[in-house]
Amino acid sequence: MNYESGEAPQQAADKPQRTRGGRIAMIAGIVLCAVLLPGFIVSLTLLINSLIHPGTPPDFMGYTPLIVESDSMKPFFQKNDLLIVRSAPKDEAYRKGEVICFKSEGVYITHRIVEVSREGDDTVYTTQGDANNTPDTDSVRPNQIVGVYRSHIKGLGGFVLYIQTPQGMVLCVMLPVFLIFGLFSAVPRMADRLSCRKKSEKISD
């Protein structure tokens, strides 16, 4: 293919090149996106599940985050910690010593199994908080159990409580969007303009 007067090469030469600062900002945006995207997906999924199933703790891929509201299991975990509970089938058998989350009179409780027994055809569990002197009054039946304890994160419950408020939800959803937009779009353009300005000042000198 023939070009007259070297127009195509000139167009290629005039194509703006990303400056070093712009490339750094772009890489930072990619890294930030990789870090924030999983958390954004998890938060959005939990929010949608909570709207679809009100009154039931939302879960993500079988794992339910719960906020500790008392010190009945101290020092194993304590108030304002964030629990991770794995959902389990209703017919799953639990062992003495396991920590389970169950619903009792509309309240979700996470205590340790201290005894496993039978009542007719049903397996029932006696539970007790590690910090309590006596077992819980009522036995726990399989249909009450939400899941079994898997892990916890100290002190994160307060933050999770905040992001469940309308202001927190807006912040959790919108902040990552603005940060990613800024690092992918606004910051690289600013870096390019600053670099071009510095080059112009050097040429004029």
Image: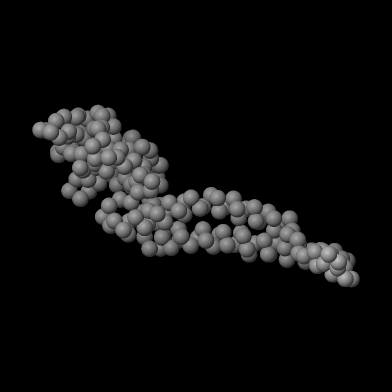
User: Residue placed at 47% from the left, 51% from the top?
Assistant: 39
- Image side of residue 76 versus residue 96, left or right: right
Q: Residue furthest front?
A: 1
Q: Nearer the viewer, residue 24 or 37?
A: 37
- Image side of residue 136 versus residue 150, left or right: left
Residue 121 visible: yes
User: Residue placed at 86% from the left, 66% from the top?
Assistant: 2
In the rendered view of the protein, which quadrant contains the N terminus? Answer: bottom right
In the rendered view of the protein, which quadrant contains the C terminus? Answer: bottom right
Q: Position of residue 163 (x, y in %)?
A: 40, 56
Q: Residue furthest left?
A: 120
Relative to 67, is 168 above or below?
A: below
State the scheme by which the image is colored: one colour
Q: Position of residue 29 (x, y in %)?
A: 60, 55
Q: Position of residue 59 (x, y in %)?
A: 35, 49
Relative to 136, is 46 above or below?
A: below
User: Residue placed at 47% from the left, 54% from the top?
Assistant: 40
Relative to 193, is 58 above or below?
A: above
User: Residue placed at 37% from the left, 53% from the top?
Assistant: 46
Relative to 64, is 167 above or below?
A: below
Q: Position of residue 150 (x, y in %)?
A: 36, 37
Quarter-of-image position of residue 131: top left
Quarter-of-image position of residue 54: bottom left
Residue 135 visible: no
Total residue callouts: 0
- Image side of residue 191 versus residue 165, left or right: right
